[in-house]
Image (tube, grey):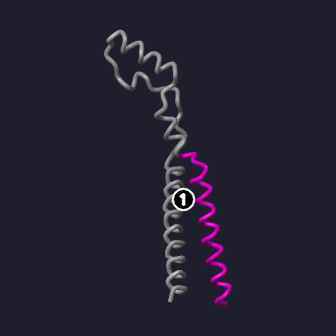
Amino acid sequence: MGKSLIRLCSLLILIIFVTSYIISASGYYEYSILQKRVISSDKIKEFEEDIKNNKDMDLVDYLDKDRVNYSNKITTLVYNISDNSNKLVKKVIKAFFRDISSFLSE
């Protein structure tokens, strides 16, 4: 009973870690946020022309208005859950190895 419980917990921790690592390593969420900040080359040229002509400028005029944001509450929630579980797993692994190293050094 004890060994099977330890194996089950270890397997569960491994699955959570691998899943959260894959989600964070894919970088989809960060990429979508980055894309919101990127200004196209055409807009940069337009901005430079407006500077040369001393026009009044607003940053909103140069952002891509056609971009569709597909994120919703569920995707944000899933990302937050995976990010928090990733942090938790890292803490658990660090504590585990810290305990093992203190046990071995004694």
From the image, give the main secondary structure of the stretch colored magenta.
Answer: helix
Residue at figure coordinates x 52%, y 26% from the top left: 66
Q: At numbered mark 1, what does the secondary structure look like: helix, strand or loop? A: helix
Q: Is residue 45 placed above or below 2 in the rendered structure?
A: above
Residue at figure coordinates x 49%, y 76% from the top left: 95
**Residue located beneath label 1 in the image:** 82
**Residue span colored magenta:** 1-29
Residue 38 at what x, y percent from top left?
A: 49, 31
Residue 22 image-quadrant placement: bottom right
Residue 19 at what x, y percent from top left?
A: 62, 61
Label 1 Cα crowd, 10 Å radius (few <14 / some 14-19 / many 20+): many
Task: Find the residue positioned furthest to the front.
Answer: 105
Q: Is residue 69 left or right of residue 51?
A: right
Residue 21 at what x, y percent from top left?
A: 59, 59
Residue 42 at what x, y percent from top left?
A: 51, 18
Q: Is residue 30 placed above or below 18 in the rendered structure?
A: above
Task: Find the residue positioned furthest to the top.
Answer: 53
Q: Is residue 62 placed above or below 26 in the rendered structure?
A: above
Q: For the image shown, how many numbered marks are present on the structure?
A: 1
Residue at figure coordinates x 43%, y 23% from the top left: 62
User: Is residue 5 magenta-colored?
Assistant: yes
Q: Is residue 76 placed above or below 105 in the rendered structure?
A: above
Q: Nearer the viewer, residue 50 or 84?
A: 50
User: Is residue 18 magenta-colored?
Assistant: yes
